[in-house]
Image: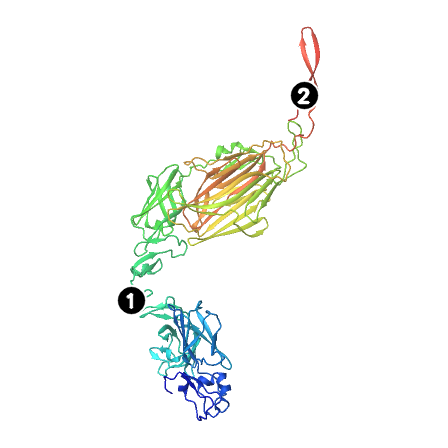
C-alpha cells in the first residue's frame, strides 16, 4: 500500500487473497469481509479484535504471538514518552492495544504511526521501569527502562554442544538489532534478547579452554565489559566505577585491571615502584603513586604508628618498655623494648650519665644491656639511634643497696624486700594499724573484748560482693559500704597531656566464675585500636601468699586480689605512655542499721613517697567507724616478652569520700598488673555502747576532810553514758 494512506475502509467488499504486511501501518476496516485468506500478518494475528472480525479463513490463527518488539524513548524536557517498534498495536479498536501497570498521569497514548509509534505527553510521575501489558491472547508484559542505563550482567552460562552463551541480568533490549556482543574482539551473533536475558552463538574460532576472556555487551550503544570462562558458567562481579579502556573489569573479583605500568580508575596514573619494595614488603607498603614507602607494623600489633620509618622502612621507631635497674652502686642495666636491627650512633643517657654499651652482643632488636655509674633517685632515659631520639620520663630508678620498709614496719612485723609482713594483730604497708584478730570474715561470736565501759565487743562480719553486671567490687561491713572500680585507661603524650581516654567502668563483660575467682573481659575496638582487657577478681578465703613480678606478699583472709591484663594496646606515638585509674570510695548502706558507737569521720590517706624515693609497694587507706580499707599496689608490672619493669603509683584525685589512684605504665603493647584490697576492723572497735538505755543517776559519797573531825556529805552526780 501507499505509505501516505492513513485510513482505509474495506468493509463489505469481495476482495480475496492474503493481506500484505504493509497494511499494518494504516487503520484499515475489514469488517464484513470474509473472503480474504492466507496467512494473517503478525501485526493483526497478535490481537484478538482482528481475529474475531476477519473470520476463520486464515491459516495461522492459532500461531503464538512472538513478533512484538517494543522500545521506549523519554524526552524529559517535554515530558513526552515514545513507544515505538514492531506490532505494538492499532488504535481503532474498542480494546486498547496495551496498558501500563503503573499510572504515569491523566493523559492518553496517541497512535502517531499505527502499529509503529505511540506517544504520551505530559507524564506526572515516571518510575525507573515501566511495565507494558499488551492485549494479546494470552497477554504479554514487557519491561522497559525510562533511563539510559548500561546493561547489567549478573551471570553467564555456556552450552558447549551448541556454543550458546546465555547472559542473565537487566537493561537489555527486545530488539536484537540494538544488541552487540563481542568475545575476545569477535562478534557473538545474538539469537534472542529480552529485558533480562540475551543469547548468542560463540564463534567456533575461539579457544573454548580460555579463561578470563574479555567480553563486551552493548545495548543501544551503552556498553558493559565483563570477563568469562569459555568453558562453564559463573556469577559476575561488577566493577564500580565502570572500567574504561585500556583497562578491563575482572568479573571474578569485581576489580578493574590496568595494563602494565598504569593504575587508577582511568588507568591514567603511572605505576611507580619503591626502593627494594619497602624492605621486601615486610615492613611497609609501597605507595605506587608517589613511589614512597608507607611504613607499617610487620607484626600487625601497633597499627596507629609505625614500628619502622625511613625511605626503605628499615629504621626502627624505637622505644623502651621495661627497665631492670641497678642498685645505687651502678652496674649493668637491662632495657627491654623495640630497637630494630640497625643501631647507628646509639647513645643512651640516664639522667646526666651515659649508659655505656660494652659490646655489640649487648644489642638485640628487643633488648639492650649497658653499664651505668653509681647514682640515686629517679631519672629520665634519653635514647638516640639512627638520628632518632626517644625519651622516657622518670623511667629509671636506682634501687637502694638495702631495700627498707616504711618506718621499719614500726616494730610490728618483718621487712622482706621492702614489704612488711605484719604480725597477726597489725596491718598496713608499715604495720601501723592494730586490728582485731577476729575481723574480716573470721567472725567468732564467742570472742568478746571488754572496753572501758565493759560492753560486749562482737566483731561484725565483712561481706564481699562482686557485681557481675558492672565489674565493680562492693565490700560491706555493717552500714559501711566500700566500692572499688577500675574506671578508665588514659593515654598521655610526652608532656603528660591526655590524648585519648577509654572509660571502663560499668562496661565489663562477665565471663565466668571458677571457685572464688571472677573473670571479666572488655574490648577496645575502633579505627585506631584493637585491644583486649582481662580483669580477674579473687576472693581470698584464708590467708594466702602470692608472688608477682619477683615480689612475695600475703593477702589476709577476706581480702580481694585483682589482676588486670592489657593486651595489644596501640599507641598514637612511641613517646606516649599509659595510665590505669582505680577508684575507691566509702558510702552507707541504707538498708542496714547504723552503729554509732565509733568514730564516724571518714579519713582517706595515701602513702605514696616522694618522687626520688624508691618504694616497693604503695597503698591507700580509708578509715571510718574504726574500720580500715587498705588497697596495695606493687610498683612493678610485667610487660612485653614477660619482662618485669618498675612502675609508679600516684594520687590522681581525692575527695571527702573517695580517692582515685593512677597506675603509671611505660610505653609497651602488653601489661599485667596485680593490686589487692582488704577491709579489716581496728582493735578499738566498739560493737555496742548501750545507746538505747536511759541515762542513770548514781549517788556518790564525797569525803570532805576537816580539822579534828570527819564530815560525811552526800552529793548527787549524773553519770551520763556517752
Q: Is residue 701 above or below residue 547?
A: above
Q: Secondary structure at mark 2?
A: strand
Q: Quadrant of the N terminus?
A: bottom left
> Which residue is label 2 attached to?
718
Count of marks, rendered view: 2
Q: Quadrant of the C terminus?
A: top right
Percent x, y of residue 369: 36, 47
Q: Secondary structure at mark 1?
A: loop
Percent x, y of residue 679: 57, 39
Q: Is residue 258 above or below residue 699?
A: below
Residue reaching furthest top? 708
Q: Is residue 689 found left or right of 360 in the rendered image? A: right
Nearer to us in this view, 628 or 494: 494
What colour scheme has been applied to the protein in the rendered image? rainbow
Nearer-N-terminus badge (2/1): 1
What is the number of the mark on residue 563? none
Q: For mark 1, does the 10 Å Cα neighbourhood hold few (<14), some (14 to 19), or many (20 or more) residues?
A: few
Q: Are marks 2 and 1 in contact (CB under 8 Å)?
A: no
Q: Is residue 666 found left or right of 624 in the rendered image? A: left
- At a point 46% along the width and 70% down the height, the residue shown is 106
Q: Is residue 32 above or below residue 428?
A: below
Percent x, y of residue 358: 32, 46
Nearer to us in this view, 448 or 521: 521
Q: For mark 2, does the 10 Å Cα neighbourhood hold few (<14), some (14 to 19), or many (20 or more) residues?
A: few
Q: Is residue 200 visible?
A: yes
Q: Is residue 415 above or below residue 137?
A: above
What is the number of the mark on residue 261? 1
Q: Is residue 420 visible?
A: no
Q: CA distance from mark 2 to mark 1?
A: 107 Å
Nearer to us in this view, 357 or 201: 201
Q: Which image quarter: residue 112?
A: bottom left
Percent x, y of residue 171: 42, 73
Amino acid at each position: 500500500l501507499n505509505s501516505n494512506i492513513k485510513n482505509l475502509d474495506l468493509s463489505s467488499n469481495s476482495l480475496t487473497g492474503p493481506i500484505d504486511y504493509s497494511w499494518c501501518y494504516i487503520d484499515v476496516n475489514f469488517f464484513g469481509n470474509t473472503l480474504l485468506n492466507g496467512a494473517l500478518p503478525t501485526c493483526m494475528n497478535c490481537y484478538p479484535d482482528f481475529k474475531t472480525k476477519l473470520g476463520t479463513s486464515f491459516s495461522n490463527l492459532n500461531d503464538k504471538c512472538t513478533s512484538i518488539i517494543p522500545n521506549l524513548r523519554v524526552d524529559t524536557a517535554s515530558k513526552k514518552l515514545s513507544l515505538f517498534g514492531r506490532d505494538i498495536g492499532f488504535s481503532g479498536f474498542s480494546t486498547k492495544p496495551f496498558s501500563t501497570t503503573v499510572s504515569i498521569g491523566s493523559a492518553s497514548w496517541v497512535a502517531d504511526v499505527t502499529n509503529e509509534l505511540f506517544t504520551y505527553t505530559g507524564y506526572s510521575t515516571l518510575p525507573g521501569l515501566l511495565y507494558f501489558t499488551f492485549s494479546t491472547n494470552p497477554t504479554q508484559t514487557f519491561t522497559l527502562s525510562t533511563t539510559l542505563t548500561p546493561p547489567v550482567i549478573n551471570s553467564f552460562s555456556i552450552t558447549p554442544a551448541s556454543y550458546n552463551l546465555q547472559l542473565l541480568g537487566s537493561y537489555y533490549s527486545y530488539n536484537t538489532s540494538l544488541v552487540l556482543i563481542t568475545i575476545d574482539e569477535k562478534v557473538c551473533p545474538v539469537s534472542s534478547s529480552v529485558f533480562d536475558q540475551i543469547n548468542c552463538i560463540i564463534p567456533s574460532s575461539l579457544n573454548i579452554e580460555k579463561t578470563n576472556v574479555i567480553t563486551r555487551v552493548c545495548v543501544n550503544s551503552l556498553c558493559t565489559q565483563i570477563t568469562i570462562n569459555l568453558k562453564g558458567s559463573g556469577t559476575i562481579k561488577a566493577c564500580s566505577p565502570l572500567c574504561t579502556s585500556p583497562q578491563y573489569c575482572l568479573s571474578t573479583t569485581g576489580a578493574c585491571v590496568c595494563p602494565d605500568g598504569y593504575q587508577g580508575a582511568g588507568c591514567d596514573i603511572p605505576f611507580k615502584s619503591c626502593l627494594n619494595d619497602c624492605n621486601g614488603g615486610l615492613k611497609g607498603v609501597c605507595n605506587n603513586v608517589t613511589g614512597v614507602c608507607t611504613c607499617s607494623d610487620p607484626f600487625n600489633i601497633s597499627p596507629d604508628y609505625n614500628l619502622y620509618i625511613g625511605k626503605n622502612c628499615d629504621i626502627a621507631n624505637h622505644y623502651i618498655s621495661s627497665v631492670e635497674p641497678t642498685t645505687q652502686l651502678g652496674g649493668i642495666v637491662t632495657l627491654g623494648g623495640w630497637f630494630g636491627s640497625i643501631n647507628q650512633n646509639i647513645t643512651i643517657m640516664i639522667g646526666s650519665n651515659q649508659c655505656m654499651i660494652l659490646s655489640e652482643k649487648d644489642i638485640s632488636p628487643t633488648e639492650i644491656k649497658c653499664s651505668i655509674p653509681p647514682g640515686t633517685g629517679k631519672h629520665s632515659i634519653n635514647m638516640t639511634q639512627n638520628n632518632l631520639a626517644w625519651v622516657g620520663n622518670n623511667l629509671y630508678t636506682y634501687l637502694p643497696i638495702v631495700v627498707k620498709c616504711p618506718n621499719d614496719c614500726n616494730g610490728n612485723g618483718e621487712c622482706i624486700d621492702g614489704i612488711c609482713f605484719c604480725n597477726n594483730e597489725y596491718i598496713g604497708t608499715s604495720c601501723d594499724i592494730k586490728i582485731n584478730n577476729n575481723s574480716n570474715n573470721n567472725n567468732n561470736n564467742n570472742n568478746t573484748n571488754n572496753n572501758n565501759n565493759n560492753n560486749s565487743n562482737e566483731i561484725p562480719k565483712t561481706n564481699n560482693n562482686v557485681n557481675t553486671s558492672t565489674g565493680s567490687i562492693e565490700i560491706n561491713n555493717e552500714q559501711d559500704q566500700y566500692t572499688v572500680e577500675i574506671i578508665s585507661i588514659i593515654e598521655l603524650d610526652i608532656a603528660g597531656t591526655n590524648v585519648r581516654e577509654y572509660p571502663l567502668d560499668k562496661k565489663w563483660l562477665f565471663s565466668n566464675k571458677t571457685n572464688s575467682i571472677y573473670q571479666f573481659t572488655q574490648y577496645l575496638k575502633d579505627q585506631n585500636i584493637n585491644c583486649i582487657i582481662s580483669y580477674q577478681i579473687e576472693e581470698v578465703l584464708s590467708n594466702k601468699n602470692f608472688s608477682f613480678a619477683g615480689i612475695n606478699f600475703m593477702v589476709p583472709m577476706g581480702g580481694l586480689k585483682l589482676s588486670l591484663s592489657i593486651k595489644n594496646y596501640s599507641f598514637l606515638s612511641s613517646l606516649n605512655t599509659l595510665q590505669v585509674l582505680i577508684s575507691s570510695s566509702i558510702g552507707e548502706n541504707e538498708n542496714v542499721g547504723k552503729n554509732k558507737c565509733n568514730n564516724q569521720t571518714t579519713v582517706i590517706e595515701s602513702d605514696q613517697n616522694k618522687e626520688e624515693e624508691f618504694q616497693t609497694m604503695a597503698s591507700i587507706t580509708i578509715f571510718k567507724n574504726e574500720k580500715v580499707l587498705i588497697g596495695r599496689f606493687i610498683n612493678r608490672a610485667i610487660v612485653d616478652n614477660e619482662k618485669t619493669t618498675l612502675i609508679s603509683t600516684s594520687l590522681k584525685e581525692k575527695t571527702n569520700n573517695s580517692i582515685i589512684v593512677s597506675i603509671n605504665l611505660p610505653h609497651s603493647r602488653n601489661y599485667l598488673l596485680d593490686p589487692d584490697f582488704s577491709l579489716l576492723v581496728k582493735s578499738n572497735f566498739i560493737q555496742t555502747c548501750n545507746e538505747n538505755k536511759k541515762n542513770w543517776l548514781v549517788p556518790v559519797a564525797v569525803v570532805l576532810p576537816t580539822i579534828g573531825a570527819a564530815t560525811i556529805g552526800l552529793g548527787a552526780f549524773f553519770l551520763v553514758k556517752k
